[in-house]
Amino acid sequence: MDTQNLTEPEMRPEQFKAWRRSLGLKQKEAAEYLGLKKRMIQYYEKGKRDGRPVEIPKSVRLACFALTQGVADYNGERILPLDHDPVPSDDF
């Protein structure tokens, strides 16, 4: 696969917020699923932090996609489906 010609798609703040709402998640729940603090969710949704632009990292965008596909977590072998509690677990 030729990755040199791929441009990294950006996720705009309104897209991020729409993603969260489409899954019916509160900011706190989205933060728990993404392994972030609620404050980062707020920054991503505003697009700014302390007056400076905030970019949503590729790892977060990919995690958003995984959650959209029903994947809450993955340990390299097994998938933890989204219907589980968004609290991290070591034994799946």
Image (cartoon, rainbow, N blue to C red):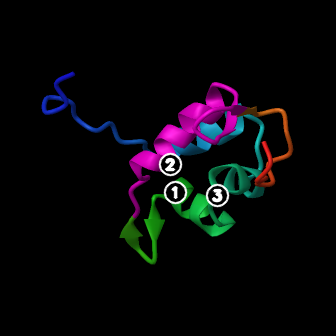
The residue closer to the viewer here, 7 or 49, is 7
Going by the numbered disc 2, the residue's amino acid type is Val
The residue closer to the viewer here, 17 or 28, is 28
Residue 45: quadrant of the picture: bottom right
The residues bearing labels 1 and 2 have C-alpha atoms spaced at a distance of 10 Å
Q: Residue furthest bottom?
A: 50
Chain-order first, disc 3 or disc 1 = 3
Q: Secondary structure at mark 3?
A: loop
Q: Which residue is mark 3?
A: 35
- The span picked out in magenta is 54-79
Going by the numbered disc 1, the residue's amino acid type is Tyr
Residue at 59 percent of width and 33 percent of height: 66
Residue 40: quadrant of the picture: bottom right
Residue at 63 percent of width and 68 percent of height: 39
Q: Are marks 2 and 3 in contact (CB under 8 Å)?
A: no
The residues bearing labels 3 and 1 have C-alpha atoms spaced at a distance of 14 Å
Residue at 68 percent of width and 32 percent of height: 78
Residue neighbourhood size for the residue with mark 1, other residues' Cα within 10 Å, grouped as few (<14), some (14–19), many (≥20) = many
- Relative side of 89 to 65, left or right: right
Location of the N terminus (image quadrant): top left
Residue at 41 percent of width and 52 percent of height: 57
Q: Position of residue 84 (x, y in %)?
A: 85, 38
Q: Which residue is mark 1?
A: 44
Question: In the image, which disc is placed on residue 60?
Answer: 2
Residue 27: quadrant of the picture: bottom right
Does the segment drawn in magenta span residue 49?
no
